[in-house]
Image (cartoon, helix red, strand yellow):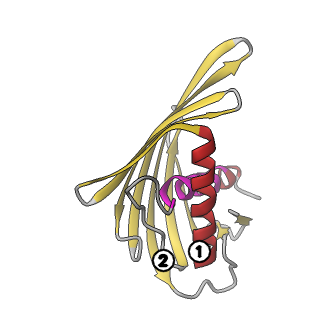
C-alpha cells in the first residue's frame, strides 16, 4: 500500500462499520448502508493533528449483514456496556469494552439516511499498560459517506480504493 495512512483510515472505516452497523442491541436498531459504491471521507485525530482520507468502498448487502452479525457477537463478548438509543433524528451508541489488556470507552453518533448519505462521529479513549505505565489515547473519527451508485465497477464487496488507486480489503 503506497499511502501509510490509507490502511489506518480503512481500518477506521471498518471500525465505523463495526460500531455503526449492528443489526440490533436491546430495543434500538441501527441502519445498514445501502449496497453499492460509497465515497467515504474520513478524518481521524489521535492528538497529533487530523489525518484526512477520501476513498471509495464497495458495499454488498451480504457483507453489511455479516459485519452487523459479527459486531453484535463481538460486543456481547467484550463489552460491559453497549447502549443504543435514538436521539432526535440520529442514533447514539455508548460502549465500554475490554480487549485483552486494553479498555475502550466510546460514544458514536450517527445521522443520515444511510441510503444516500451518512455521518458517523466516534469519540473514544483507549487505555492500557505500556512499559509499566498506564497510557491513554483519545481518538476522534468523523466519517461522511456519500452513495455513488449501484455499480462498484472493478471493486468487489468489502474492497476499498484510495485516491492513488491502491486497494485494500476491509473484510
* Prevailing secondary structure class for the magenta stretch in the rendered image: helix
Q: Which residues are magenta?
A: 8-22
**91 and 166: which is toward the camera:** 91
Q: Is residue 12 magenta?
A: yes
Would you say 6 lies left or right of 21 here? right
Q: Counting other residues with Cα less than 10 Å from the Cα at mark 1, is it few (<14), some (14-19), or many (20 or more)?
A: many
Magenta segment: does it hold 146?
no
Q: Which x, y percent locates residue 144?
A: 43, 61
Residue 5 percent location from the top left of the image = 65, 50
Task: Give the quarter of the figure containing the N terminus.
Answer: bottom right
Give the x, y percent position of residue 108: 42, 47
| Residue shown at the point (42%, 52%) measured from the top left | 26
Residue at label 1? 59
Distance between the alpha carbons at the discs numbered 2 and 1? 7 Å
Q: Regarding mark 1 in the picture, which secondary structure is present there?
A: strand
Q: Are marks 2 and 1 in contact (CB under 8 Å)?
A: yes
Could you tell me which residue is drawn at 66 percent across and 12 percent down?
A: 133
Amino acid at each position: 500500500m503506497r499511502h501509510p495512512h490509507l490502511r489506518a483510515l480503512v481500518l477506521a472505516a471498518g471500525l465505523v462499520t463495526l460500531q455503526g452497523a449492528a443489526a440490533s442491541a436491546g430495543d434500538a436498531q441501527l441502519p445498514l448502508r445501502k449496497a453499492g459504491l460509497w465515497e467515504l471521507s474520513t478524518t481521524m485525530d489521535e492528538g497529533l493533528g487530523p489525518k484526512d482520507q477520501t476513498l471509495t468502498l464497495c458495499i454488498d448487502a451480504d457483507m453489511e449483514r455479516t459485519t452487523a452479525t459479527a459486531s453484535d457477537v463481538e460486543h456481547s463478548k467484550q463489552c460491559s456496556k453497549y447502549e443504543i438509543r435514538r436521539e432526535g433524528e440520529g442514533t447514539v451508541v455508548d460502549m465500554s469494552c475490554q480487549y485483552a489488556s486494553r479498555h475502550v470507552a466510546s460514544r458514536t453518533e450517527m445521522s443520515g439516511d444511510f441510503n444516500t448519505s451518512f455521518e458517523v462521529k466516534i469519540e473514544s479513549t483507549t487505555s492500557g499498560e505500556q512499559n509499566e505505565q498506564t497510557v491513554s489515547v483519545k481518538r476522534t473519527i468523523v466519517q461522511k459517506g456519500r452513495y455513488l451508485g449501484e455499480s462498484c465497477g472493478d471493486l468487489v464487496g468489502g474492497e476499498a480504493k484510495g485516491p492513488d488507486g491502491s486497494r485494500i480489503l476491509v473484510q
